[in-house]
Amino acid sequence: MDIKTVGNSVIITGNIKTIGDYQAIKSTLESLAATSKTITIDIKDSISITSSVIGFLTKLVQKEKIDIQIRVGDANLYNLFDEINVVQLFKVTKAK
């Protein structure tokens, strides 16, 4: 997995699957959340996401009141977000 920041957007390429991936995402989002209340996350091609990342995103939205918007490139990942009922919470959309 590779992660980069552009403004208040985070671009993630590759699969999100390890504890190291979670730590990189958490660190990046914590830094952004300190300066921005709106964060866009563009998950280009991952087919899955770890429960720890989902839990951290939930904390950012519900406790820290960060406005998260997620764009996903893979239909399976979108379906996963839909199955666990977080499409509205994270404002998940499919990338075009």
Image (cartoon, rainbow, N blue to C red):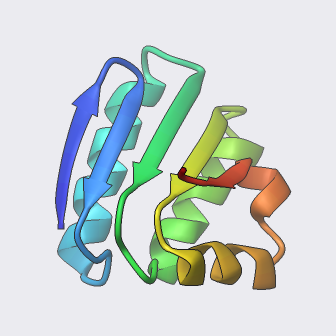
Residue 61, horizontal then vertical, whole percent: 70, 44
Counting every numbered tag in the picture gives 0
Looking at the image, residue 59 sits to the left or right of residue 47; the answer is: right
Residue 70, horizontal then vertical, whole percent: 58, 49
Residue 35, horizontal then vertical, whole percent: 43, 14
> Image point 21% across, 50% down: which residue?
3
Looking at the image, residue 26 sits to the left or right of residue 37; the answer is: left
User: In the rendered image, is residue 84 in sight?
Assistant: no
| 56 relative to 79, above or below | above
Of 14 and 86, nearer the camera is 14
Of 13 and 5, nearer the camera is 13
Q: Quadrant of residue 64?
A: top right
| 41 relative to 58, above or below | above
> Image point 67% across, 53% down: which residue?
93
| 93 relative to 68, above or below | below
Q: Which quadrant does the N terminus fall into?
A: bottom left
> Image point 59% across, 21% down: which residue?
37
| 37 relative to 76, above or below | above
Q: Quadrant of residue 10?
A: top left
User: In the rendered image, is residue 20 in sight?
Assistant: yes
Residue 31, horizontal then vertical, whole percent: 32, 30
Of 10 and 35, nearer the camera is 10
